[in-house]
Image (cartoon, helix red, strand yellow):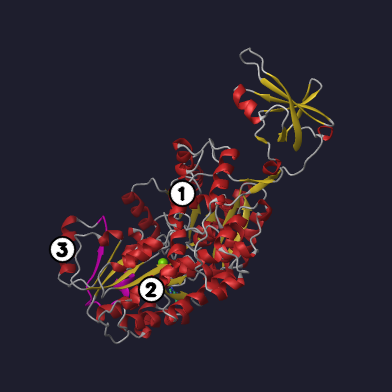
């Protein structure tokens, strides 16, 4: 077994770990020794404080050193076994329920000195401790700080400590992968020493120390190496250049009625350059909600079409696909055959559409992920655009980049602005275009917070907006009333509003049939009713230029980024718009902070950064469920300098064509090795 394989061992290979324990740990996603090592202790119990029996404090954790004096084993069922122990100052009784004599004799041999730690009580003129867990004849095993890990039912602290101590004791010295220059920055802390220190209770929370930073750096470096390799592979793919005369935005602008922003034009140029280049494009267009990504994608698609290729444009929902399709119809020359494939498309039409794609008559097709069904065949697919993606991990993206063959460029669009350090580690395999600037003349969205009890004022306000022809989103966190959580449901709010606004209000949530859902959204878009009560399903991408008010109930339930996304559903037209955040009771300090940030700023990049500071990166919009790897130790906010250092190191590794074998163990430690293997 090599050093690394040792770490991958099954837990049952450890002493004292049976199948049952292993199974419980598995449920906590602890499968190997390695998983044990990267779980941090959360706090510790200090048992280092040795006291005399006469100084024992009742109910507090104390440690005593005593001589075992006498056994008292009553031969009556249900009566506990007792052991009398003494020190110079007094005596204690250890009380054992359900323990065998033999076990007790071994644990507490008569006339021997033992150290006992735990909570003592006072009963019938004597100190006593019941079923003590921390007993040893070797006092140094007890007299220290003891780590506390978050444990699951069925695993005691003792079992877990035994496990981790075994692992740490036999920890192999792995061959160093960090370069001497980098290692020096962490005062030459080796991996092994760092891991040991990580589990030293006196180091808990010491994230600024060299050992901790070394391990965090390892983690960052491993993911950057993977990205660097994927990039390298993609850049090696030679494709046929797309040859076209770039559409002048001016021509399109006439049809649109607005001018593109500088950021839109810059992003468009970056994409065009990629399309014309000899290597396959793998790019992400990142921009805040409402920054106008769609139009950039559509213009670039037209360029690809003009160079003789077909385009597949994928959206997360059918209604969004339709909206993009309608926009394309509006701005594309009429001789270009455009098609929309949704579940609503009739079978006959589907067949025709498929036929047209196969014959390269249809130049661009809009749809959901169903576009990638096997039965849909393109004659000359050259460009895939995927809107509103923030839920693909690196493995999914890799398989995506393989789709459509070498000649196929890929553009992803994401409306989740994230800080640069996070971009680096999430989209490090892609080129990046950013639209930061919002279209001119767009009015700020005014954001207010209101107590639920003031709902009458909100109704009045909403009523007034409706009278002026505007439309309103009303978002609730729940579908039905739940006895467990005290949040407002769409059902309750819909019933309430219905009494006031009659047919001007409709309700939408995840349980509504998809056809019905589409119809409601379509009707709302066509202004057939005024107020849409819904869950957060309206979060994604759809453009409702006539809606200018959004009310969000139980706003403290949502994260900052999510609130910002929801707010982005309004304020897309040129009207002044309003976001009303509703709360049940007075706000917590944290909630007040969040509201302040939202009121102050409409910049998604700024907001996501603040969000991360408040909640940690794992929680920002969708990333938790995304299959995107969570860091074990590194933190994109706390360790920004390490990300930058790792970025430099990657450049050095790339430029010096360093052999990556050196990093194999590192990649395995962070479960990235398979990605690299796939590339080979
Ligand atoms: P997102 O980036 O969130 O996908 P969209 O592409 O849906 O944003 O655009 C949001 C709205 O802004 C649309 O109504 C679109 O027509 C409009 N828009 C896009 N670019 C501009 C611009 N340069 N000036 C004014 N309005 C624009
Ligand atoms: Mg969009």
* Residue identified by numbered label 3: 352
Res 563 seen here = yes
Q: Which residues are magenta?
A: 326-344
Is disc 1's CB within 8 Å of ligand 2? Answer: no
Q: Residue at x 36, y 83 (%)?
A: 273
- Whether residue 437 is visible here, answered yes or no, is no
For marks 3 and 2, the one nearer the N-term is 2
Question: How far apart in space, not on screen, are marks 3 and 2 (Cα)?
Answer: 38 Å
Along the viewing direction, whichever of 308 and 494 lies nearer the viewer = 308
The image's mark for residue 231 is 2
Distance between the Cα atoms at labels 1 and 2?
31 Å
Q: Nearer the viewer, residue 196 or 640?
A: 196
Ligand 1's quadrant: bottom left
Helix, strand or loop under label 3: helix
Q: Quadrant of residue 187?
A: bottom right
Residue 585: % across, % down: 65, 47
Mark identifier at residue 296: none
Q: Which residue is mark 1?
A: 32
Left or right of 184? Residue 90 is right
Q: Secondary structure at mark 1?
A: loop
- Whichever of labels 3 and 1 marks the residue nearer the N terminus, that label is 1
Circle 3 packing at 10 Å, graded few (<14), some (14-19), many (20+), is few
User: Where is residue 317 drawn, in percent x and y?
Assistant: 35, 58
Direction from residue 248 to residue 497 in the image, left or right: right
Foreground pick, 134 / 310: 134
As measured in the structure, the alpha-carbon distance from the residue carrying label 3 to the one carrying label 1 is 54 Å
Furthest-front residue in this view: 111
Q: Is residue 40 above or below residue 354?
A: above
Question: From what the image shows, is residue 1 above or below residue 413?
Answer: above
């Amino acid at each position: 077994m090599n050093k690394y394989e040792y770490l991958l061992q099954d837990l049952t290979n450890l002493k004292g770990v049976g199948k049952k324990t292993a199974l419980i740990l598995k449920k906590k996603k602890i499968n190997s020794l390695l998983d044990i090592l990267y779980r941090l202790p959360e706090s510790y119990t200090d048992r280092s404080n040795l006291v005399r029996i006469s100084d024992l404090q009742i109910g507090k954790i104390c440690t005593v050193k005593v001589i075992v004096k006498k056994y008292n084993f009553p031969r009556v069922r249900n009566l506990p076994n007792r052991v009398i122990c003494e020190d110079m100052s007094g005596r204690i009784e250890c009380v054992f329920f359900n323990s065998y004599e033999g076990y007790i004799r071994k644990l507490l041999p008569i006339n021997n000195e033992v150290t006992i730690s735990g909570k003592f009580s006072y009963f019938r003129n004597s100190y006593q401790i019941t079923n003590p867990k921390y007993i040893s004849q070797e006092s140094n095993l007890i007299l220290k700080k003891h780590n506390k890990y978050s444990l699951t039912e069925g695993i005691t602290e003792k079992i877990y400590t035994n496990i981790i101590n075994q692992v740490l004791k036999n920890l192999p010295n792995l061959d160093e992968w960090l370069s001497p220059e980098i290692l020096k920055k962490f005062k030459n802390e080796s991996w092994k020493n760092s891991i040991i220190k990580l589990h030293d209770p006196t180091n808990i929370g010491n994230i600024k120390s060299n050992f901790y930073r070394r391990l965090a750096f390892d983690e960052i470096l491993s993911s950057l190496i993977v990205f660097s390799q994927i990039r390298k592979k993609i850049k090696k793919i030679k494709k046929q250049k797309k040859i076209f005369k770039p559409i002048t935005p001016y021509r399109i602008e006439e049809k649109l009625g607005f001018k593109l922003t500088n950021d839109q034009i810059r992003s468009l140029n970056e994409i065009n350059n990629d399309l014309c280049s000899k290597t396959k494009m793998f790019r992400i267009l990142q921009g805040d909600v409402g920054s106008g990504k769609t139009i950039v994608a559509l213009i670039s698609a037209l360029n690809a079409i003009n160079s003789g290729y077909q385009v597949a444009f994928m959206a997360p929902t059918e209604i969004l696909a339709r909206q993009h399709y309608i926009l394309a119809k509006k701005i594309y020359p009429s001789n270009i055959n455009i098609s929309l494939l949704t579940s609503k498309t009739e079978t006959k039409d589907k067949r025709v559409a498929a036929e047209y794609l196969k014959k390269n008559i249809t130049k661009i097709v809009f749809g959901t992920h169903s576009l990638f069904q096997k039965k849909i065949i393109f004659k000359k697919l050259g460009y895939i655009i995927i809107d509103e993606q923030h839920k693909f991990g690196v493995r999914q993206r890799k398989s995506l980049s393989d789709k459509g063959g070498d000649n196929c460029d890929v553009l992803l669009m994401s409306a989740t602005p994230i800080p640069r350090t996070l971009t680096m580690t999430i989209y490090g395999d892609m080129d990046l275009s950013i639209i930061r600037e919002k279209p001119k003349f767009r009015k700020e969205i005014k954001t207010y917070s209101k107590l639920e009890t003031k709902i009458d004022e909100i109704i009045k306000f909403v009523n007034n907006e409706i009278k002026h022809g505007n439309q309103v989103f009303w978002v609730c966190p729940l579908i039905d009333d739940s006895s467990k959580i005290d949040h407002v449901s769409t059902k309750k709010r819909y019933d309430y509003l219905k009494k006031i606004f009659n047919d001007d209000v409709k309700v939408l949530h995840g349980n509504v049939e998809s056809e019905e859902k589409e119809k409601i959204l379509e009707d709302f878009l066509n202004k057939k009713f005024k107020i849409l009560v819904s869950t957060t399903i309206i979060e994604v991408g759809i453009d409702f230029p006539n809606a200018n008010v959004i009310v969000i109930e139980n706003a403290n339930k949502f994260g900052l980024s999510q609130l910002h996304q929801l707010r982005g559903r309004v304020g897309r037209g040129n009207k002044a718009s309003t976001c009303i955040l509703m709360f049940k009771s007075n706000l917590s300090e944290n909630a007040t902070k969040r509201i302040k940030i939202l009121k102050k700023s409409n910049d998604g990049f700024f907001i996501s950064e603040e969000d991360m500071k408040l909640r940690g990166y794992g929680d920002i919009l969708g990333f938790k469920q995304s299959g995107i790897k969570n860091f074990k130790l590194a933190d994109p906010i706390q360790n920004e300098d390490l990300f930058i250092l790792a970025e430099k190191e990657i450049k050095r590794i790339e430029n010096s064509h360093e052999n990556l074998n050196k990093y194999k163990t590192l990649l395995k430690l962070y479960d990235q090795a398979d990605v690299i293997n796939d590339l080979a």
